[in-house]
Image (cartoon, grey):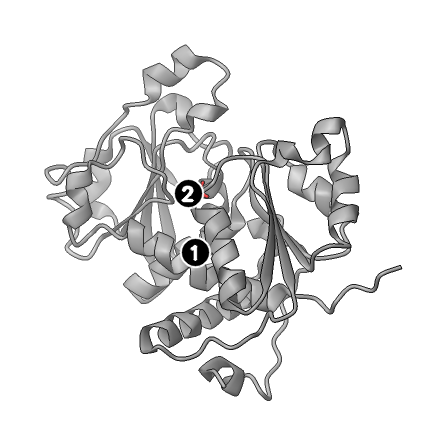
Amino acid sequence: MSTLEHNNKTAPESLSFRHLLSAEDISREDLEMILDRAAQYHIDAKNGAPVGQTCAGRILATLFFEASTRTRFSFESAMLRLGGQVISLEQGLSSSVKKGESLADTGRIVSAYADLIAMRHPEAGSVAELAMNARIPVINAGDGINEHPTQALADLYTIRHDKGRLNALTVGIAGDLKYGRTVRSLVRLLSLYPDIRFVFISHPSLRMDAPPADAMITDNIADVIGDLDVLYVTRVQKERFADAAEYETVKNAFTLTPESLARTKKDMILMHPLPRVNEIDPAVDALPQARYFEQAARAVFVRMALLALMQAPAPVTD
Ligand code: CP
């Protein structure tokens, strides 16, 4: 029996949400339940302890209408590690959506073939549309410029793991704050905790809509880098620009180098949801501040926790 199965024998846990469409669905209790479970999977993996078969007999459908490496593979890896199985639509337009089938009908149909859905789509609100008629839990794996709540869960896991807390932090978020869905979800989740001071760093045309009222806003990373406990960098989201010329003017707002990181606090951590393009020079990868590859690797434990906690009773077939 795995450590987790042993620990949970008398304490069943349940999340407050059925579908995970937005970071706003996640309460602080949900968040801590997910991160604690992820930490246990992480520890078990380090110790070589058996994972258990929490999702045995369950099927995850990954419906991806947009490119992904980390999110799709880590969801699929998570399900397989938990003893479940995966059916996958790697390129969503190979589905009958291409023939005009609605996402709402697709959700109803896939509900008969799987027990959980993780979906990515280029349009904001598309995952909620699919969830409308789904009879199984649906997870938003990124909907256009809107949200990417499971990335934010993975981000908070690394902040808690590496900083030892989720409160009383100065968090700099740099890059594309207008189109970056990970940023929106991250700010929502971190706002569940007290004494978080946000510093938003971007080209003026890439600022966040409706940032928290007390956030600091700047376009000069050098001015603020020494104050930060966490620096979270995002790429400029080329695929969201209607005007290619506009992308060209903002794509190289900054590139972090070992020199530009020389003035950070000793224990500042540098994060990125990845993929990176040119915002972090590869020479930074060897610095102690660089945590983005660990952040991506640990996401599998977070997605394992989510799948284990979100699985619903097996659906009844009509
Ligand atoms: N962070 C993230 O969403 O990466 P992918 O686009 O590779 O899934």
Q: Which mark is residue 154?
A: 1
Residue 243 location (% of width, % of height): 46, 13
From the viewer's perspective, is residue 143 above or below residue 48?
A: above
Image point 63% across, 31% down: which residue?
93
Residue 83 location (% of width, % of height): 55, 69
Q: In which quarter of the image is the C terminus?
A: bottom right
The residue carrying pointer 2 sits among few (fewer than 14), some (14 to 19) or many (20 or more) residues within 10 Å by Cα, namely few
Residue positioned most to the top: 245
Disc 2 from disc 1: Cα separation: 25 Å
Residue 310 location (% of width, % of height): 62, 64
Tell me which numbered mark, 2 or 1, is placed earlier along the sequence.
1
Q: In this view, does 223 lie to the left or right of 302?
A: left
Identify the image quadrant of residue 59. bottom right
Q: Regarding mark 1 in the picture, which secondary structure is present there?
A: helix
Residue 187 location (% of width, % of height): 46, 47
Q: Which amino acid does label 1 sit on?
A: Ala
The residue carrying pointer 1 sits among few (fewer than 14), some (14 to 19) or many (20 or more) residues within 10 Å by Cα, namely many
From the viewer's perspective, is residue 125 above or below residue 3?
A: above
How many marks on residues? 2
Query: Would residue 260 be seen by someone viewing this image from the given angle?
Result: yes
Q: Is residue 62 left or right of residue 48?
A: right
Q: Regarding mark 2 in the picture, which secondary structure is present there?
A: loop
Q: What residue type is labelled 2?
A: Asp
Whether the residue carrying mark 2 lies under 8 Å from ligand 1 is answered with no
Q: Which mark is residue 214?
A: 2
Image point 58% across, 65% down: which residue?
84
Q: State which mark lies toward you, 2 or 1.
A: 1
